């Protein structure tokens, strides 16, 4: 698992952005049918739970639900909220819009919990511009019976930034960039930007507000309010 997108040229004044909404506005077209039914979260199964108290914790993909999320990267960073689990491994998969598998990666998750990130490595196929893909993250609850996997995922599309958006980004503070990404449908870049900024300034209330707004706008309120 790789580190998240780095945000460069940060200065102390870059944080003093005016109040701006970070609600996600999806592209004006529907996602293909298919993928994991019901969107981005799955309650932790008893076979995966590390204790009985963890059965109601959800495995959640940080994806915009039934909508397509854009990314300016050919190999985007994907994020999953992983509950406490006794499972030792997970599997990341990438499919085309007809749900034909094009890439798969095993991910060790022993003693891991919370927000984790997955980035397509250099030997993975890069996304083709303006083609829609589905990604999934599956916890192998029972390695001998993969039908018991917990699976979440989402839709992604690589779309190069237009010159107009690039100009707006160049004139924005780093927090405003996350808002601009969200408003233009670049879900994965908005998420990665805010997470990187939160790693740098975990106690910044403006970042917390942007994070809550972004996730709540696609129904991920539980993750938005998680400690």
Image (cartoon, rainbow, N blue to C red):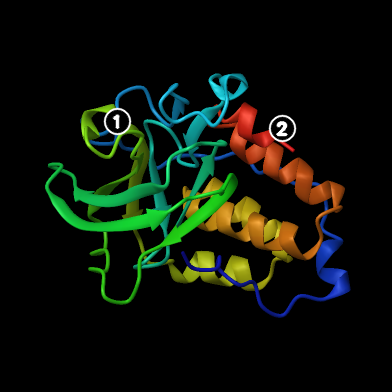
Residue where numbered disc 1 is placed: 36
Name the residue rendered at 71%, 65% in the picture: 174
Q: Secondary structure at mark 1?
A: loop
188 horizontally vs 94: left or right: right
Q: Is residue 207 above or below residue 139?
A: below
Dot 1, crowdedness within 10 Å: few (<14), some or many (≥20)? some
Q: Is residue 42 visible?
A: yes
Q: How many numbered circles are shown? A: 2
Q: Which mark is residue 225?
A: 2
Q: Is residue 30 above or below residue 93?
A: above
Evaluate if marks 2 and 1 touch, with contact meaning CB atoms under 8 Å apart: no
29 horizontally vs 78: left or right: left
Distance Cα–Cα, label 2 vs label 1: 24 Å
Q: Which mark is residue 76?
A: none
Name the residue rendered at 32%, 51% in the picture: 92
Name the residue rendered at 46%, 64% in the picture: 1
Residue 84 point in image, percent of width and height: 57, 36
Q: Quadrant of residue 38?
A: top left
Residue nearest the viewer, comparing 91 with 28: 91
Q: Is residue 12 above or below residue 70?
A: below
Q: Residue furthest bottom?
A: 9
Q: Secondary structure at mark 2?
A: loop
Of label 2 and label 1, which has the lower sequence position? 1
Q: Quadrant of residue 53?
A: top right
Quadrant in the picture for the C terminus: top right
Dot 2, crowdedness within 10 Å: few (<14), some or many (≥20)? few
33 horizontally vs 24: left or right: left
Residue nearest the viewer, comparing 69 with 148: 148
Residue 124 point in image, percent of width and height: 26, 69
Name the residue rendered at 57%, 71% in the picture: 167
1 horizontally vs 99: left or right: right
Residue 95 point in image, percent of width and height: 20, 49
């Amino acid at each position: 698992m790789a580190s998240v997108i780095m945000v460069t040229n940060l200065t102390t004044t870059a944080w003093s952005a005016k109040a701006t909404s970070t609600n996600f506005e999806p592209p004006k077209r529907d996602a293909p049918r298919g993928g994991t039914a019901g969107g981005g979260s799955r309650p932790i199964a008893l076979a995966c739970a590390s204790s009985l108290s963890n059965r109601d914790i959800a495995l959640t993909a940080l994806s915009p639900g039934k909508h397509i999320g854009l990314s300016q990267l050919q190999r985007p960073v994907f994020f999953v909220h992983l509950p406490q689990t006794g499972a030792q491994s997970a599997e990341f998969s990438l499919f085309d819009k007809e749900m034909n598998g094009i890439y798969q990666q095993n991910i060790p998750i022993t003693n891991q919990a919370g927000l984790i990130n997955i980035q397509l490595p250099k030997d993975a196929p890069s996304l083709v511009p303006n083609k829609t893909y589905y990604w999934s993250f599956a916890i192998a609850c029972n390695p001998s019976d993969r039908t018991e996997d917990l699976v979440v995922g989402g839709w992604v599309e690589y779309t190069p930034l237009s010159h107009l958006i690039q100009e707006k980004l160049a004139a924005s503070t780093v927090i405003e960039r996350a808002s601009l990404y969200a408003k233009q449908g670049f879900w994965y870049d908005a998420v990665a930007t805010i997470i990187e900024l939160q790693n740098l300034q975990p106690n910044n209330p403006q970042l917390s507000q942007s994070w809550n707004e972004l996730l709540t706008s696609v129904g991920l309120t539980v993750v938005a309010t998680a400690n």
